[in-house]
């Protein structure tokens, strides 16, 4: 923990093995620990670990949408739905292999898969997969801007653009 006014380290909080991402929600920090297959929950006021949540597999990323956490487990091909009130796993959604980055728009999640042309569409309210969009080539880097998803494909000289409003490729 760094005091930004003084530019000094004021606290070190021990978490699981290979922390890859931290998300803040409701006065808590959620640290995704890739190699220890868990998440560390930190009380931001006291700067203390209040819980370690066993996730299993290899959690790699986490997003927050409408009061729920969505954790990507790329080893078990799952999206784990996290309840922030209880700090527990509500549901496990099975997805295609090697889930990578998750984006949100309205009540849908859009999940890319490493080394694959697929984008999985997830109905966030029903907490289930709804379908797929197939890119023209394997997906590289991805960026969201408003209701568009910009997809750089591996081994090509183009960026594909998807419109979340229509779930279709537009360019």
Image: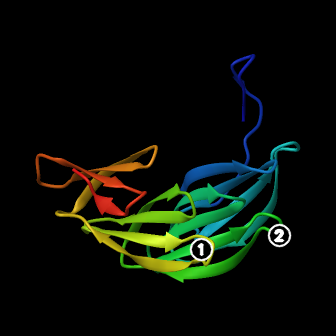
Query: In the image, 5: left or right of 96?
Result: right
Q: Position of residue 141 (x, y in %)?
A: 30, 50
| Circle nearer the N terminus (2, 1) | 1
Residue 69 circle label: none
Count of marks placed on residues: 2
Say which element carries label 1: strand
Q: Hey, which residue is sitting farthest front in the picture?
A: 166
Query: In the image, 2: left or right of 108?
Result: right
Residue under circle 2? 86
Q: Position of residue 71 (x, y in %)?
A: 57, 66
Which of the 4 image quarters holds residue 19? bottom right
Relative to 77, residue 49 above or below = above
Say which element carries label 2: loop
Q: Residue at x 70, y 48 (%)?
A: 24
Q: Is residue 146 visible?
A: yes
Residue under circle 1? 80
40 or 82: nearer the viewer: 82
Q: Residue at x 44, y 63 (%)?
A: 110
Q: Position of residue 145 (x, y in %)?
A: 42, 42
Q: Could you tell me which quadrant the N terminus lies in?
A: top right
């Amino acid at each position: 923990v760094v005091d930004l006014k003084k530019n000094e380290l004021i606290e070190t909080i021990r978490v699981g093995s290979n922390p890859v991402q931290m998300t803040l929600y409701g006065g808590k920090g959620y640290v995704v620990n890739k190699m220890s297959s868990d998440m560390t929950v930190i009380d931001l006021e006291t700067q203390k670990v209040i819980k370690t949540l066993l996730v299993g597999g290899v959690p790699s990323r986490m997003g927050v949408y409408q009061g729920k956490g969505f954790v990507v487990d790329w080893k078990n091909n799952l999206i784990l739905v996290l309840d922030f009130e209880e700090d527990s796993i509500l549901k496990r959604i099975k997805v295609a292999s090697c889930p990578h980055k998750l984006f949100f728009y309205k009540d849908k999640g859009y999940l890319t898969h490493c080394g694959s042309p697929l984008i999985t569409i997830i109905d966030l309210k029903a907490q289930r997969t709804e379908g797929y969009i197939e890119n023209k080539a394997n997906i590289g880097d991805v960026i969201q801007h408003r209701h568009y998803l910009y997809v750089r494909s591996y081994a090509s000289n183009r960026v594909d653009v998807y419109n979340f409003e229509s779930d279709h490729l537009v360019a």
